[in-house]
Amino acid sequence: MANTRVAGLREAMKQQQIEAVWITDDVNRRYLTGFTGSSGYVLITVDHAYLLTDFRYMTQASEQAKDFMIVEHGPSVNENLKQLLQEAGFTRLGFEEDHTVFSTYRKYESDLKPCELVPVKGMVEGLRMFKDSGELELMKKAADLADKTFLHMLELLKPGVSEWDMALELETFMRKHGASGTAFETIMASGERSAMPHGVASSRIMRNNEFVTMDFGALLNGYCSDITRTVFLGEPTAKHREIYDIVLEAQMHTLEHLKPGMTGREGDALARDIIARYGYGDLFGHSTGHGLGMYVHEEPRLSKLSDTVLQPGMVVTVEPGIYIPGFGGVRIEDDVVITDSGVRRLTESTKDFITL
């Protein structure tokens, strides 16, 4: 697994004429090495792949990162890094500009002289956009757990319970069934709060005749799922049904027409144009979707601002919504993988308008 990913990174390094790159982001480290410890650094050169960690993880690193040379670093990681660079004769080092704070950069400047520091952006993330078969299998398991959790919540949601209690139950269920945690802070928004796209759980008590929006995901084996379903407590009005049906139409239309070769901007328009046609365009203020993987938000994006071309193996969410202040909101979201001809859903929960 690691050999293929390192080879891909070396190809990207070659294109940018960089002989060595220093990886400090935790997720990028795990992606390249398979090492799940909480502390470590990766140095990839044209000839070697190193994983530097401390004494706590030496045995674990040797077991998990079999394709890497394991180095036990001392109190100053930069000293070990400088020694490796000098031994190889490298005078330029790429570093992850998106994951390096300015104070750390200044320390590199001081400690690694006379090595030239070269900022690189999205080098590993570009590889991570394309999921291999093993990753897709893990993501399907995370999606299946989200589906199972949704069914569990349908048995519990009712007037008189608090958003906090329902969010806690949801998260506890996922942990009891194998998740190492939540993919992000659970959104549990009822009534007028369902008009808040990121309405995390509050002390509000759910009541009759209102929407409940649940947006949640499992972190399972290092990969995230992300699903949103909106249900109704009590008897919906014609307006409630109208909003739900429009969002569902937009979401289903996007799933049916999203395909490789489209840009993220074109994918976003599939849902946005339908919602705008019904007169609710101003009430759909976020992107149609985002990439999903080891992070819950990564490239590519289904956004008005994205020119990234969708390709097979990419995994994205499709999550249009309408949010009416003082009334409520609806969002419906699935995780899908881009295939050679369209998309394949990973989340499979029903999208019927459920009333409880």
Image (spheres, helix red, strand yellow):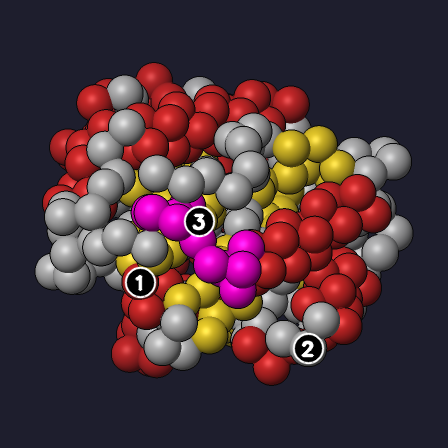
Amino acid type at image mark 3: Thr
Q: Which quadrant is home to the N terminus?
A: top right
Q: Is residue 43 left or right of residue 26?
A: right
Find out whether residue 240 is within the magenta segment: yes
Residue furthest top as drawn: 63
Vertical side of 199 occupied by 125: above or below: above
SS label for mark 3: strand
Residue 349 in view of the camera: yes
Q: Is residue 341 magenta?
A: no
Nearer-the-camera pick, 138 or 77 = 138
Circle 2 sits on which residue? 279
Q: Between disc 1 and disc 2, whose residue precedes?
A: 1
Counting residues from the N terminus, which is met first, the one under dot 1 or under dot 3? 1
Residue tagged 3:
230
Image x and y of residue 336, in percent:
64, 39
Which residue in the structure is indicated by mark 1?
A: 191
Mark 1 residue type: Gly
Residue 25 lies, in percent from the top left, at 39, 54
**Residues marked 2 and 3 touching at CB (< 8 Å):** no
- Along the polypeptide, which appears first: circle 2 or circle 3? 3
Q: Position of residue 248 (x, y in %)?
A: 63, 50
In the image, residue 149 above or below residue 130: above
Magenta region, residue range = 231-241
Whether residue 96 is visible, yes or no, is no
Determine crowd level at label 1: few under 14, some 14-19, many 20+ residues with C-alpha closer than 10 A.
many
Q: Residue at x 68, y 77 (%)?
A: 279
Helix, strand or loop at label 2? It is loop
Q: Which numbered circle lies on residue 311?
A: none
Contact check, label 1 and label 3, Cβ < 8 Å = no
In this rendering, the label closer to the viewer, 1 or 3: 1
At x 65%, y 59%, the residue is 246
Amino acid type for the residue under numbered disc 2: Gly
